[in-house]
Image: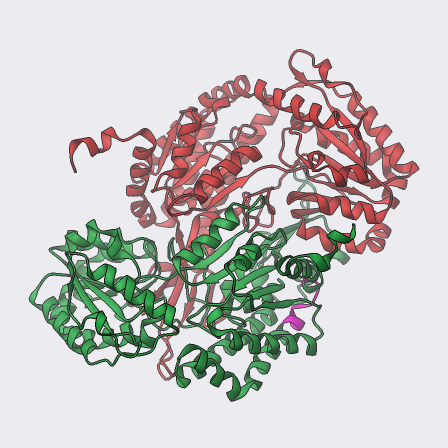
Chain colours: A red, B green
Amino acid sequence: MNQENSLTSLPETALLLNNAKLAFPKFQAVPDGSKADFLDRIAFEIEALGEELLQITMQETNLPLARLTGERGRTTMQLRMFAQMLRDGHWVEATIDHAIADKTPPKPDIRKMLVGIGPVVVFGASNFPYAYSTAGGDTASALAAGCPVVVKAHPAHLKTSQLVADAILKAAEFCQMPAHVFQHTASDSFETGKALVQDTNTAAVGFTGSYSGGRALYDYAAARKNPIPVFSEMGSTNPVLLLPDTLSKNAANIAKQYAGSINLGVGQFCTNPGILLGISSQALNEFIDQLEAEMNAIAPATMLHKGILVAYENKATKALSHESVAQKTANTSAAINSQAIPILATVSGESFIQNPLLHEEVFGPYALVVQCKDLAELKTAWQAIAGQLTTTLMGTDQDFEQYSDLIELAPYLAGRVLFNGVPTGVEVCPSMVHGGPFPASTDGRFTAVGINAVKRWVRPVSFQNCPANLLPAALKDENPLGILRMVDGKYQL
Amino acid sequence: MNQENSLTSLPETALLLNNAKLAFPKFQAVPDGSKADFLDRIAFEIEALGEELLQITMQETNLPLARLTGERGRTTMQLRMFAQMLRDGHWVEATIDHAIADKTPPKPDIRKMLVGIGPVVVFGASNFPYAYSTAGGDTASALAAGCPVVVKAHPAHLKTSQLVADAILKAAEFCQMPAHVFQHTASDSFETGKALVQDTNTAAVGFTGSYSGGRALYDYAAARKNPIPVFSEMGSTNPVLLLPDTLSKNAANIAKQYAGSINLGVGQFCTNPGILLGISSQALNEFIDQLEAEMNAIAPATMLHKGILVAYENKATKALSHESVAQKTANTSAAINSQAIPILATVSGESFIQNPLLHEEVFGPYALVVQCKDLAELKTAWQAIAGQLTTTLMGTDQDFEQYSDLIELAPYLAGRVLFNGVPTGVEVCPSMVHGGPFPASTDGRFTAVGINAVKRWVRPVSFQNCPANLLPAALKDENPLGILRMVDGKYQL
């Protein structure tokens, strides 16, 4: 290798990924227990940043202290959850099939487990400066899989990202992890992001953000000489079905509940309910009036950054300018002190079905009520919406009995189906699915929340006739890790 | 909808996928036990075709009766394996997290399971007219997931494909499956394949075949407005490491073993060992001489069809024409009666590393021995080869102790790592991984063989606060299916 090709002359992204590539087999060789200690230590170091971190993030994101304190707690909880997953050890899906010498032809001994996929590039999210950014769910799950991580900080909270990155590096040093298991770039250029995805050493990508951003990264990855998986979580309108019987009985309560959900965190959640569908009736009109009153009473609020406010106003204006859409709450042009004003609008089922523009997410405190003429139109309108993170059915027992076909269809529209609740609030637990058919995510077969988020960064490997002394611990006959395994076709716990 | 848009005027592919879309929720609603009966019945109907099927396939593929009889057995076994998986019921990965009312905020009840992804398009494989074609592993696993299947027959064995398709349809009728759970097209145009992948109702694609074919389908799918997963299994060179101590002790035996594997089925297996790497030595020379003698003794044989023979000769000629490659066995131009002649060639490690052309698969009875000057070069040459279905380590205990770093690296190069064996022969069992990093497959996170092949066609769905009477059986508290579940973070069996 001549000097011109030496590493120091490489662009920053190539250097980062070359480092990550070299770190990968070393990190894979670290026992899961030590990886768990590392994840726990990251949580400890983030907590040790104390008030300073919270104050800086408040300045950078306009998010209130209580929200940030909660999100920090969720972030350290996630890190500890993956640490616990590693200590439990079941996650590798160990599978053993013993040899059968007298079969024709003889059956070899085969054993399988999951291993890390390689270096993972994570893009920080604007709306979750902790839980889906530098040490968030993507990073925690990738590190748990033994994949070195390269984080591209979100430009809206660079100082926060740097502080958290430093905490991770401190934890890596304390736990004597291999060099470069975690790296961080604060470059905010579009070209950097593109180069990170295109780098030949990148094995997978995690992204949370806009459709345009997530789709662009997916396209770069798919166009590579060696395509790689990209998990982009690109948001949703989270359609809600308001069924007749519950509307006739609970319109006011549901309006109150949804005013809260639509405006939670200034509507800046990917599970924000942006589309509510019902069958035209007196009860639906009362619901709309009540929701309008509730939303008019909510004070304008500051969004994460100016760019998000501008996008909110532009997207809302575009939707509202549609001739079939009736605005119920105050006009967007009345924006005060660069704050976002809650917007409620209505549209007929027919117009909604005919205008896919109205299906698009308006990221912010916006909701569109779709007034359908009958059940058939409600069903058509609901099914016309592309893949979703969530869909919610608001109904009484009588509704659910009467409209059972809607319940049967719901799982095919979204990653999570809710009954009589609000989609905001994503519980971090093994049964949570945060993902969904495109465009909610680029691969509905995975979740970004909960321990199964690790499955995005792993692949199975079989070992055939491997000498017993060379087998990984998870696959040794004596099951030294005490994990769930499928042995000769039967689960053993 | 006006007449011009009516279904009857749709192109064939759109009609097939529209049918499949309508069948999807109905098929999902069929209990797993009934789906299992359907799969069993397909196996029964294929067996009922008896000798007629075998004779026609022999004519179409030039494969011998014994091989076809074995492959038919594998195919019906696969169908019954997925039936058993459905009856066992564990496959849905049921996960339950109960509500915790006194948590802040209160934790809802969340339950998760796998559901089918939607209509799956399967492309028949030329080299497995039964096991990876019309009723092969892709079809069986997709039907097990409750996904309607549209098969595009491989043009090289249309009659076989039609007979098997008829058997599946007979089984579907016998088992009263919803209409269109299985459909078949014999169109052999390239445009049909493209249209099947691009159809908006297609949810996923399974393909086994060439790199160019698999990559093209992947690219069509990625360029869609709503990208969909494509699992293309595109073959491999399945590199074999011949370690020094075993070569010095077992050169003749290994040569005999590998002559058999390289020429099994006229080399027409995706797990065919096409590249063998060793460190230059007297023992390696003896191995090459022995392998040359073995391969010269093997009679030329007829390949699946003329196109495959032409491709074999072209690819081999291209590799052999490289100035650094030395041919050991008879010249390809001596092809007799359109039969394939086994080819053995050698190359230095240095030349191999510098010429990626030599890493490419030559589909047929071809092998290249890479003579490396030392361990470092062996390692570099091995790692220079892109993602593989398998890699094999031939060594004694002493070799494995001395070259332990090679054992550590092996899992990152391939989906299956073999010790002292041959990669041909893919055991169908839960621990088998048939897949690997690109270009072995388009997504190394999945396998095409074994029960986990079903994971390609499913996605997880959460049900939040679902009324108990509406929960799917797999998620009811009383566990009526008696399946493995994770409940409140702990596995229960």
* Nearer the observer, A21 or B225: B225
Q: In this view, does B306 lie above or below A411?
A: below
* Nearer the observer, A433 or B434: B434
Farthest left residue?
A: B282
Residue at 34 percent of width and 54 percent of height: B387
**Residue span colored magenta:** B28-35
**Where residue B258 sits in the image (x, y, percent)?**
24, 73
Image quarter of residue A337 = top right
Does A34 sit left or right of B39 as displayed? left
Farthest right residue?
A: A282
**Where residue B163 sits in the image (x, y, percent)?**
57, 78
Question: Is B33 included in the stretch rendered in magenta?
Answer: yes
Image quarter of residue A173 = top left
Majority secondary structure in the magenta region: helix
- How many numbered marks are there? 0
Residue at 26 percent of width and 56 percent of height: B359
**Where residue A80 sits in the image (x, y, percent)?**
48, 41
